[in-house]
């Protein structure tokens, strides 16, 4: 049995924890009653388990193939699956109805995206990047650009890409060299080389819409001279009819450790025709709209690989007979017990569950903030939600991808020697998940974004609001015996995070190296605090169902995994605080030549 | 510049920390003065950097090729390198002079082995397994078997393998099915299938000597009915002349995530001729001699991959220009600063150094125990050293492979997107290192060996001796200001380990699940304590050199890395203790069907 989407858990978070029905009067939510949401989740589960999941190992083993005519063939089966994806209307789920989308809230769309990313991460990147291109044009495009591109990107009829990186310029976009020369007719000639372009060329869609960062001749140096262009593979007429082949080609594919099913392209622009998106020299601002959305999506990818790897490991642990339980045989009629009897195997599986279920709630809670930031009638709530989106995006990207990779490694460990062979799925999950810690801004960049930008924004308003929300929860639930361990642990972890935040304010402003030296530990301490809050919310919701007499063992199991989180994951918080407070002096004082 | 063997650090540990010259009157040490040792290290460094390291990426990319005639071709260049290895006498370095070896102490041999494993882990496994076969025959073979096999295995003229695993039987050797039928002439017919046999077939040596676990007809079930056989690929005459091809073939290679340069073989035995090694049904005891040696070697592999990956990452961080230092440009004339200026990059590099340098000392210290257990004139010292070898083997195997893999992951992270491509070495180190956590007993098995067997042996004598040794060091250095942070941290960490040990005694005996649930955290807490002790010893040795007026910056840098260890690595100890004390109840109480 392959990957099974965790629909039961999605339903629990959406209904019992976030109670999304309470927003039924708001735009987006109004169109999707909770019953409809459940139907969508079930259908998505079927599609992803039956169509995308079986192609995952094929994509890994066969990979993409580049030909000297600059075409790229995706792995066997991808083309049909993409056709089924588009016909099923899946790419349009979260897009604006004005552009042919179904306008589903992001919180629901995220649950569906988790499924496709678990089922086949390399495949899901094609529609994922397309949605990024959609968002960039939605944010910065002209009316004509919107009318031409958005419906076709929303449906998946055309696909999209993000073109930022060049050989000399990854994190530091100020070093960007790709040139844009105005022709005089409103178009530009784009020339340069871009690397690591996911989905830069393939055979899935009839057109590929490249969003390209380039520098207009005479623009200021550095990041203030970068503009955004739309460069379609085939130049469309205003009616969308495909015209001439544009002068942008895939010059080759990068050989990489994982996500072999996604074409990672070197793109050569040789006086390709492009159109400016938004204003001159303001391209980065639009790209960051796209990027923020993408970062949340990458956090989701980290979670999704952890989930799929967990499922494979749990199945292996149930099936593999080896050795006996330390407390006497549990499968006395068999040659040995399943390895699930061993505490250390259960430890790894429950560690995974504690992170995955907490992380899933944290992601969905944040995605709901994204929805409410747009549609909540109360301005204060919109501001709070907007603040949280900004604050949590680097936390979720960094924390969930670091932990997702660690879960994939534990999943391989549970497989023993089998896991290291390519006959079992553990290796692919481990290899595929590793990129999530790197792309869309390495996790080190996320940590810097958190301590250097997000904490400080608006005088620290976002983090103070978050602390206040936790304090209110703790105060409001101090007397509930069943919740006590969760509330106490939350209070304790939040106190550590607040302590660390104070330390950063006192030491990071005078010496930014102190903030940067603390940043990764701070991000992880933040992640732990977020998960502690989610586990308190989940324990409350599950406890509520149990108190109502709901006999579904799901709820007791949920609280059980929560206890494991308190016992086995949260103890890491103190170590993060100690590391944060150790400062930057030792690492900065080490002589460069001695590394 | 590729991998550069860390000879300076080896010299420091051997001379300044372990002061191996003090043993110059003992067998083995007597033959190798410290000057000779330095010459050997330098020569080994040259050989490994120049001959083996350049073949490492070739081995990864080309891999081994199986042909339908059951032969296996190693990657281009491996054959010549193996010839050079044998001609250089490297395999014989640590072997007994009685069998053609050079009789070098294990502590020196280990330093050389680290180099070959860093330079080319997949290649180094061929002589590594050969030495294992040598050790098994040395431990259990008859005089005739010794005379026939040992000189040829010691030199590397013939290579060796360990055949334990079968499809249904990995960790649980009691499930072993391979059959041995006595022929009546002193030989046996061996029939069965073995999997994951490293170096089971290849084109490097003229003969391959398989050490095979099998069950003699009528033997007791389980682990008490397993015997060890020697099954040569070509049946040799008493003079070593190669005779008939034996009925053992490589039926195929396993596709795996890493170590592509090493042939991982499915071996088919079809009435192959074998000779009993040692007594009937006592094969496991001899195999465990081999296994213990191999486990220390695998800990070394974990360290070795971390070291090579660290070097690649440090070189990348010096070269890659991207962004500016938070405290103002450090490379104002260049387009950007090298990423080495960023605290989070330095954190990862120094984390690696703190583990690698501490781990190297811990490994060499333990290997010296192995030497002294054999040759020390004092019986008490021999016993102490023997105890430590047993106690530290699972700690070093588990701790250094877990941390080695984590270092390889950080090294990839420092490379950014480049690291995920196969154009840089980071991916290979990450993939190759991952197997070390699995083979020769998964790290979970190491942890069980530690808490279930090694702690309890002789009434806990080994661990009590270790605690006593640390207490004596702490008491003896309480007044040395320069050492104070190291001594205090050591005392504190040892107190945590002792606390955990007490908890295990009180809770693990009554319920073994408590011990098993705690085992991995206990192993890591033990590893941290071992490293804390090594860092105290190293800080003392380096401080001594500085006090003597030695101006080599190596010594100040050593103390500097030690401070990083105290600030950034040791804080994890408290979390391990908290997890250990949380017990097994939650993880064992979770319903099996809910995983």
Image (cartoon, coloured by chain):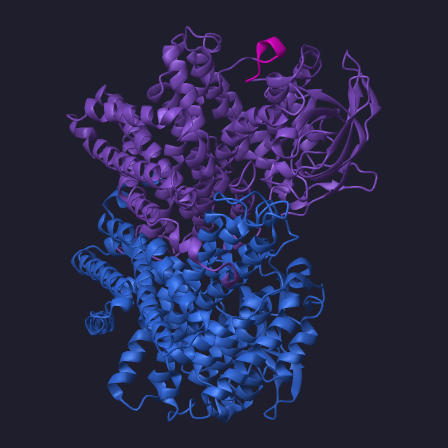
Chain colours: A blue, B purple
What stretch of residues is rendered in magenta? B94-101
Residue B352 appears in which quarter of the rendering?
Answer: top left
Q: Residue at x 50, y 18 (%)?
A: B40
Query: Residue A425: image x %, image y %?
Result: 61, 57
Q: Residue at x 42, y 83 (%)?
A: A139
Residue B98 vertical placement versus B179 (above, below): above
Query: Residue B401: image x %, image y %?
Result: 47, 40
In this rendering, position of residue A308 left or right of residue B253:
left
Most common secondary structure along the magenta stretch? loop
Q: Is residue A205 visible?
A: no
Is A118 or A143 nearer to us in this picture?
A: A118
Query: Residue A480: image x %, image y %?
Result: 24, 70
Residue B452 appears in which quarter of the rendering?
Answer: top left
Residue B217 vertical placement versus A318 (above, below): above
Q: Residue at x 41, y 61 (%)?
A: A355
Residue A116 vertical placement versus B293 (above, below): below
Q: Is residue B501 magenta?
A: no
Residue A475 appears in which quarter of the rendering?
Answer: bottom left
Is B584 or B123 nearer to us in this picture?
A: B584
Q: Residue at x 54, y 72 (%)?
A: A115
């Amino acid at each position: 049995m392959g990957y099974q989407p965790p629909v039961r858990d999605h339903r629990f978070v959406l209904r019992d924890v976030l109670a999304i029905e309470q927003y039924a009067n708001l735009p987006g939510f109004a169109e999707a009653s909770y019953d409809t949401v459940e139907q969508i989740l079930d259908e998505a589960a079927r599609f992803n388990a039956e169509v995308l999941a079986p192609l995952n190992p094929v994509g890994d083993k066969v990979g993409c193939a580049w030909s000297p005519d600059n075409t790229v063939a995706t792995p066997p089966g991808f083309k049909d699956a993409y056709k089924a994806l588009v016909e099923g209307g899946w790419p349009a789920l979260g897009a604006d109805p004005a552009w042919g989308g179904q306008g589903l809230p992001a919180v629901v769309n995220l649950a569906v995206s988790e499924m496709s990313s678990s089922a086949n991460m390399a495949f899901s990147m094609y529609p994922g990047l397309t949605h990024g291109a959609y968002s960039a044009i939605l944010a910065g495009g002209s009316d004509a650009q919107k009318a031409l591109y958005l419906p076709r990107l929303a449906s998946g009829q055309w696909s999209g890409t993000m073109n930022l990186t060049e050989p000399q310029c990854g994190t530091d976009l100020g070093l960007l060299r790709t040139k844009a020369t105005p022709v005089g007719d409103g178009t530009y000639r784009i020339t340069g080389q871009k690397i690591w372009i996911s989905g830069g060329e393939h055979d899935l869609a009839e057109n590929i819409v490249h969003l390209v960062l380039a520098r207009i001749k005479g623009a200021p140096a550095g990041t203030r001279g970068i503009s955004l262009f739309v460069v379609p593979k085939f130049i469309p007429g205003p009616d969308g009819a495909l015209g001439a082949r544009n002068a942008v080609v895939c010059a080759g594919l990068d050989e990489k450790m994982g996500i072999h099913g996604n074409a990672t392209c070197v793109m050569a622009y040789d006086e390709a025709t492009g159109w400016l998106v938004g204003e001159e020299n303001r391209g980065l601002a639009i790209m960051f709209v796209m990027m923020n959305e993408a970062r949340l999506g990458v956090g989701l990818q980290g979670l999704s690989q952890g989930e799929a790897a967990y499922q494979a490991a749990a199945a292996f642990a149930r099936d593999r007979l080896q050795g006996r339980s330390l407390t006497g045989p549990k499968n006395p009629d068999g040659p040995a017990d399943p390895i699930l009897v061993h505490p250390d195997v259960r430890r790894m599986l429950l560690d995974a569950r504690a992170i995955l279920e907490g992380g899933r709630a944290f992601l969905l809670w944040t995605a709901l903030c994204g929805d409410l930031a747009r549609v909540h009638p109360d301005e204060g709530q919109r501001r709070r939600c907007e603040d949280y989106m900004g604050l949590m995006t680097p936390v979720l990207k960094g924390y969930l991808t670091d932990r997702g990779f660690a879960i994939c490694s534990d999943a391989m460990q549970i497989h023993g020697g089998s896991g290291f062979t390519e006959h079992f799925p553990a290796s692919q999950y481990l290899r595929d998940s590793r990129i999530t810690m790197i792309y869309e801004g390495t996790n080190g960049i996320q940590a810097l974004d958190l301590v250097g930008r997000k904490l400080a924004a608006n005088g620290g308003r976002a983090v103070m609001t978050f602390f206040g929300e936790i304090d209110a929860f703790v105060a409001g639930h101090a007397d509930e015996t069943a919740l006590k361990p969760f509330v106490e642990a939350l209070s304790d972890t939040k106190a550590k995070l607040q302590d660390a935040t104070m330390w950063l304010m006192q030491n990071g402003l005078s010496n930014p190296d102190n903030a940067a030296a603390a940043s990764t530990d701070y991000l992880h301490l933040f992640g732990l605090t977020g998960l502690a809050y989610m586990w308190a919310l989940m324990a409350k919701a599950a406890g509520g169902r149990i108190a109502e007499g709901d006999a579904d063992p799901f709820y007791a199991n949920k609280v059980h995994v929560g206890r494991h989180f308190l016992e086995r994951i949260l103890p890491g918080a103190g170590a993060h605080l100690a590391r944060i407070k150790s400062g930057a002096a030792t690492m900065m004082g080490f002589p460069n030549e001695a590394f």
